[in-house]
Every structure is written in C-alpha cells, then in structure tokens.
Amino acid sequence: MTSTLLAPVPTAPSRLSTIASWAIWPVLLIVAVALPAIIPGNYWLQVAVNAEIMIIAAVGLYVTFGLNGQVSLGQAGFYAIGGYTAGLLVTKIGLDYGIALVLAVVMAAAIGLGVGIPALRLKGHYLALATLGLGQVIALILVNWTWLSGGALGVREIVAPFFGFDIVKISDWAILIGILTVVSIYIVQRIRVSSYGRAMQAVRDSEIAAAAMGVSLPKVKVLAFVVGAAFAGLAGALNAGFVTYISPGTYDLALSVSMLAMVVVGGSRSPWGAVLGAVLLTFLPEWLRAVQDYYLLMYGLLLLFMVAFVPKGIWGVLQGVIEFVRDRVRRAPASVEGEQR
Amino acid sequence: MILQSIVSGLAIGGIYALLAVAFLLTYRVAGVLNLAQAEFVMIGAFVASTLAGSAGWPLFAAALGGIAVAALVGALMERITYRPLRNGPHASMIIATVAVGIVLQQAAHLIWGPDPRSLPSLVPNVSLDFLGARVSTVSLFVIGISIVLIIGLNLLLGRTRLGLQMQATSVDSDTARLMGIRTGGIVIVAFMIATGLTGAAGVLVAPLFSVTIHIGMLIALKAFAACVIGGFGNLTGAAIAAFGLGIVESLAGTFIGAENKDLIAFALMIVFLVVRPQGIFGSKVGEKL
C-alpha cells in the first residue's frame, strides 16, 4: 500500500523517455485534429467523439478515484449539471456556446465544492453513498422541476456559435472536442506530478501518514473531488452541444457506474488507464452489437473479473508486460558478460 | 386522511426498514456496503411470483422459495466479492457489489424478460374501517411482518450463540477468530440472513408494485438513506429512521404533491451527512486504524 509513498517513479528516467513524454502531447494533438480525416464515415466519427467526451469525464474521475481513492457514484450528476447548464444558457438566454461551456464547468465545480466540503468529512464508503444520493437527487430534479429543466422532454436545439465560430459539421466538433480532450489529459497529467497530485496519492495510501506529514486532508480531498466534478461537467456540456439535445434519462446510475468502470477497467493508477478504459467501454457496445442482449451482463462480469483479478487494470497489465520485456532485454546482455567472465 | 397516509407510510417504511437492517448487517459483520441489495429485492419478488404463478406452488411456499433463493444467491455473492477482496481496498469491494448488481439484474432480464410480473399478497386485500380511515389489510400485513422480522433479527443477534458470534466478528474479527469463532462461516451466515431479509422485503413489496427488474432500485436507495439518517452503528435506529422516512414520504405525497416525494429521502440524507453524519441514533466513533 505504501509503495507509492516509499518508492515513487524511478528517479532518473532515460533521455529517450523524457523526450517521449514531451513529444506525446503535440503528437496527440495532431492525431486529435486529424481524426475526422483518419476515421471514415460520420457514424464512427460520432462514436469516436463520444469516446473523447467520455475520456474527459474519465480522466477527471481518475483524479478523484485513481489519485485520491474516493469512490464517486454520482459523476452522472455532474455530467448532467454541465449539460443542463450549457443547454439552458444557450437555449433560454441565447449565450455563446463557448461562454456557456466555461460557465458549465464553473457550475459543476461549484456544486462539487458545495457537496464535497461536507461529504468529505466522512470516510470513504460514506462518500460512495453520499454521491449515490446526489446523483439520484439531480436525476429526480431534472425530471420533476419542469419549469427549469423541461422535465422528461429535456432541452432541445442546443445550437450556438462557439466564441463566434459556427460549429455545425461533425468534423468541426471532432476537432474542437479532440483538442479539449488532449488538453484535459495534459492538465490531469500535470496535476498528477504536481505537489497536489503527490499529496492526493499520499492521502489515498494512508490518510494518517499523510496527515502526519503535514498534508491538509480536507483541502486535498475536496480538491480531488472538485477536479472530478469539473471535468464531468465539461464532458456533459460538450455532450449537450454535440448532440444538441439532452433529456434526464441519460443521467442515471448506470452512467455513473460506467464512468467508474472506465477508470477501473482501464487502470486506476494512470490517466492513460482512464483514457484506455473510456475508449474501450465506448467502442465495446458497438463491437458487441450482435450480442446486444448480453452486453450489460458481459459488462458486469468484466467489471467483477477486473476488480477481483486485475486490480491494476488493462494499463497496469500493459505496463507490467513492458517492464518485463525491458528487464529481459537488459538482463540478456548481462548474462552474456557473465559467461565471458 | 392523515391516518391513512401514516399507515401506508408505515408499510413502505417497513420495507425500507428490512433493507436497512439487512444492509447494516453485512456492513457491520463483513464491512461490505452491499450496493446490489436492490437486485435481491428483485430476486425475491421474481422467484416467488414464478413459483406461485407458473409452477403453481401455494403462496406461502412460493414466498419462502423466493426468500431461500435470495439467501442462496447471497451466499454465492459472499464467495465472489467478500472472499477474494476482503483484504483489498474498500473501493474494489464497493465496485464489485455494483458489478454483482448489474450481473443479477441482467440475468433476471434474460430469464424473465421485460414484461412485468405480479404476485398476489399472502393476505386477501380488504379495506378495514379503522378510526374512520380506510386501511388495507395488505399494508397492515407488511407492517406486521417487517416488525416481526426485525425484532426476530434483534433477538437472534442478542440472545443466541450465533448472534453473539456475529457481534464478536463485527467488533473485531481477528480477535473473534482467536477466540475460536469461525468468522468465515459467520460472514456467510450474515450475508445469507441479510439477502434473505431483502428477498422477504421483495416478496412483501411485490403485491404493491408490479414486478420488474427495477422494482428494488428506489427502495434500496431509500434504505441507504435511512441508514445514514438513523446512523450506521445501530440496527434498531436505522429501522426506526426507515419507518419515519416512510411516514414522512407518505405524508408529503398526500399534502405537498407526489412529484417531489422521492426527493425527500435523498435531501434528508444529504442534510444529515452535513449536519449530523453519525445519524440520529449514532454516537461519534473514531475510525478504526
């Protein structure tokens, strides 16, 4: 448990991996922008954009759950807050979508802060319950407060220019959301290696030890929670703009669970795990269309299997394989030397 | 009018109370927050309705059958969640129970299909005149049975050897094991009692609603809320809070309007988390290291 505290990442990374860790961002950005050219057909592009939106929510939850160990079962609630804030600002006030997007993130973060401060005084499993309740409250409000949310009908025609630019085509959306996705991953990666990120990990591994080292538990936990809420809000607002139509049915417990599943299945120890999980679990239902009736069943079994047998997630397994191969490669010349001696 | 809503509130409160004590039993003895409880309500209701319907069992036997199947699935669940994950992080256990819930719900969907089923009540539905109010026998039956079951559980925990062993396991499972208690077996029994009680709640609630894969969902969430309101340390406290919640909801439904009825439980839960996280009947307890 204390492994992260005592033995962090190898201290002197090779020059190659340093260059790679910087080069990855421009490469990702180019891939994200070029996505409409790479992926043929609007349908698969649409699925890819959905995957990008889920990546944003998942890397946010990675900060809350992966870095800080808090189980949130209410991410769909923040996703809904983002979506409805953007949707209502655009349709009712006629605000620019870009500004609505920013306000949606602020709103989700503010509500995350409001809920997080009291809820995080509680130990881990209480938080799961509190966020579960929060998600439920938000879902019920969306259905019942018709004057605000439009009730079960939802909000339609969420169409507005983005800071003056008209974004209509799917390929335009793919570029915008692609850029925001890469920026989100970058921010989360920076948070991870910042002093706050280290403090979050220390709190996850042992609250008592972290507090004894002078880490302010409430501050760090609330921050991790608010980051998760803000990214979920951003993802929700992007979804609202991309789909142009939102309704309460989207934001149920199943969505919260699937966001958590993305982080768990992909690997909760790295933002890349969350990215992998989000892509995988967005494309999986598409690939499994033939066995649609069994999809959710398989999904539950997969989740159970991953938690029980692959706690590090797919990314963790990949990393293990890479390290194993690297070890073998390094050891091989050494043994040759030994034979010569 | 008031009396009528109090009685129907007590009936649904009894259902919440059964789930709340079941939830706390697994939480106290095994340290597991069972987020798959809704599915055990569903199992109890579906199995009983199938046994009573197509298999033609007498109602009482069908009810017992539903409860037994729920308890058996509970034992199975202990095997695949608690057993492999008990030494892992809390988060894994919580996610595992959510996953079990998904699997059970989807399995039920495949077995029973999307059409709602029905289950008649064990007692005939008669409206009684009680102090000028119309009170249904089904409600009174639900209230009676849930109170009997909860008192029974309390007696089991306080008066029997098995109950004391469960309490010992919940206080300190390592020491309990040193004292010769087979804690592994105790945990299985706790799971079976909890899921059996939840199945019983399913059998009781089925006549009030139609039996679908979503029958337990809202009930279970409200039972969680009742646990928070009553306090996690205290089974009786949570049961009382659950009955209270049922009454408050029912009165609110009658006098304020049905649309915000479902919000009350969660709003109260969040208020309690903020103002009094230990619940009404709880005392402040230091975290175990």
Image (cartoon, grey):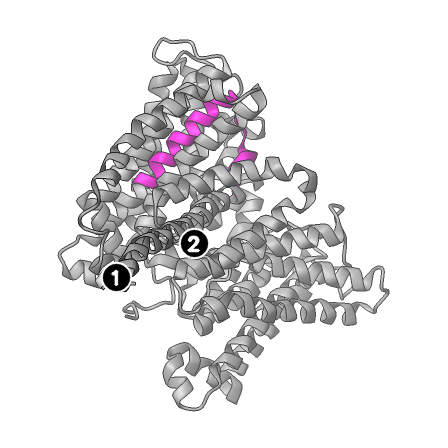
Give residue A340's mark. 1
Tell which residue pokes out farthest to the left in this image: A214
The answer for which chain carries disc 2 is A
Q: Is residue B175 magenta?
A: no
**Three-letter residue code for mark 1:** Gln
**Three-letter residue code for mark 2:** Leu
Q: State the residue position of label 2.
A: A129
The answer for which chain carries disc 1 is A
**Residue at x-position 75% and y-position 63%:** B48
Q: Which residues are magenta?
A: A227-252
Residue B101: x and y in percent read 57, 56
Give the camera-side residue of B208 and B223.
B223
**Residue at x-position 24% and y-position 38%:** A16
**Residue at x-position 18% and y-position 48%:** A12
Q: Is residue A249 magenta?
A: yes
Identify the element where label 1 is drawn: helix
**Residue at x-position 34% and y-position 41%:** A228
- Say if residue A249 shows up in the picture: yes
